[in-house]
Image: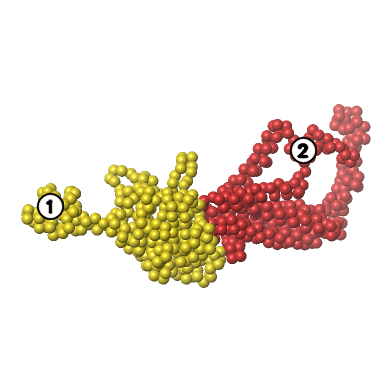
Amino acid sequence: MSLYTAETRRLTKRRFTRFFVLGTLLVLAAVAVGMFLSNHKASPERLATAQAQADREYDLAVREATKAQADCQAAQGTAAAQNYPPGCEALYQPTREDFRAEWYMPPTFNFREQFGLLLAALAALLAVMAFVIGATYVGAEWSSGGMMNLLLWRPQRVQVLSTKLAALLVSLTVFTVVVSAAWTGLFVLTARWRGTLAGMTAGAWQSILLMELRGLVLVLVLGALGFGLASLGRHTATALGAAIGAIIVFQFGLGTVLTLAKVPLATDWDSCDFSSTAGCEPATLTITWPMAGGLFAAAVVLVVGAAMWTMRSRDIT
Amino acid sequence: MSAVLEIEGLQKTYRSRKGVRRALDGFDMVVEAGQVHGFLGPNGSGKTTTLRTLLGLIRPNGGRMALLGREVPQALPEVAGSVGAIVESPQFFGNFSARDTLSLLADAGGVDRSRVHEVLELVGLRDRSADRVKTYSLGMKQRLAVASALLKNPKLLILDEPANGLDPGGIREMRTLMRNLAESGMTVVLSSHILGEVQLICDSVTIISAGRRVAAGGVADVLAQHATSAIRVRVEAIADLTSAAHTLRYLGAQVVVEPDHLMVSGIAQPGVITRALAARGVYVSELAPVAVDLESVFLELTGTTPVEGEHRQVDESVAAPAAPVNGGWGQ
């Protein structure tokens, strides 16, 4: 337990951890403030203003359509007639339906519809942070000689590395839970003051909770991967290099190769998935959370397992 | 006295594409309790590999080791709390202060944090303990490393080049500290290249060369084993050196003629030399028995005496004979 406490202290005392966490929180704060300022509540006054704006736009459109009709009629029998549809019947005639008041309303934050995307953004940002902090936390220990010093005190190598990993994952869990709760709270307030919470049934809240749970798992997986990769290479750069390599290989390299080989990757544009409602649509690979979860679980087991094995068997020089 | 550190037949082999290199080739070492023990060897001779292996950082290919009477690495977790060590150059996380560094180690090792202040005071870092380690000089980092090793209040202290980077005052303080620690009952193993220091503060030494022990025992014993009965003789006129050499050889002495003096051995009484030379009209200006020091013994045993015009490479040192010298495991 003393080692765990010391490792948690070491992690939270690091300036890099503090700066990176602060940077992440600032980005999140900027998003929250931006969303708050750019959304407005649909009050009767705003609705009346929007209706007036819609009416003005409709009147303007009617005037322009009337003039266009007159111009068209006048042009019949002249060379200018080719600029208009034959008989002038096909000219656009505006209707009230084309100028609905809600289209002239300022954006309103709809919690049920929009918060899912914001949760995904939160999870992605925290996952990147977890990967980098996980990698630097153990990478700096190796490159500074701190790991060797620690092993002179606690010669149980696997226990030391496991405790470090546990300290990292528990700290990330606490941080992610607190930030997710704050993130949810902030957008509930945004919805209350600048939007709506309509449709937030118990089922909707449960769905959000499950999404936050998946976000937490993503953060922990990326943290463990960063930690494991840096442990394997005994340097932070190993993890960052592996991340950049994975992006290049999978995002660009694999995409280019499969395109050249004419193998469909995510969407097969030559196929037809027919449905009575949507008609013919190309077959699309949708990555679901169980698929991604399985892939991440395999990667974590492989990387962290290899890190533990090399920690146990490799000389420390 | 009981042995607190015992090594027998330690072997470590490194394999690479360039071939196989035996860093340790059946190395033996014994350190008795309460001693300050010097661990000497040229660069690349296997000193640091020995210490790392002993402390569980490197896995040996063969041999036996024991610390405080317990076989290691099996019992290392149990004895680690009683063994303080610094290996090679001091390495710390630069952005932490000395106080943070030590308090984190104290937490990890279950040592009371009040001990941090004590060791900082002991190594003279009290007033700079809040500064970040990256602002420290090499000597200050060395002091911090010694402080980290002392934090556990160990029974056995292993220090690899503790005087590295220290100023003359710091070296003297370190010497006094070692002595005081030994007097308090702590055993100190000291790896160093400053042989004058080792001769001053160590009770016993082990000399390693090419992965094998080439000498071991009390400092006085090792020096005595390699002492010579040579006498340096200078005469008033250098032109008389040759005739003086003839005279002394006539008496049965072995004489080596150096540019400005003679090295004479095989004569029991130095007075015989003065009388014989005076009788020939050659007058002695200096007659001094040649004292052997640890440096000359080290250079002789490890074969690393500099030769003018030659550039010795790091692995060019002398390997010991296969048979162990006195003082092996259990002796």
**Which is nearer the eye, B225 or B247?**
B225
Q: What is the x, y in percent for residue B44?
A: 41, 49
The residue beneath circle 2 is A267
Marks 2, 1: nearer the viewer: 1
Which amino acid is tagged 1? Leu
Q: Residues within 10 Å of mark 2 (few under 14, many from 20)?
A: some
Image position of A271 with respect to B66: above or below: above
Image-based side of A183 in relation to B41, left or right: right
| Chain B visual colour | yellow
Dots 2 and 1: beta carbons under 8 Å?
Answer: no
Q: What is the x, y in percent for residue B239?
A: 11, 49
Image-based side of B286 in relation to A159, left or right: left
| Chain A visual colour | red
Which amino acid is tagged 2? Thr
Q: What is the x, y in percent for residue A85?
A: 89, 32
The residue beneath circle 1 is B251
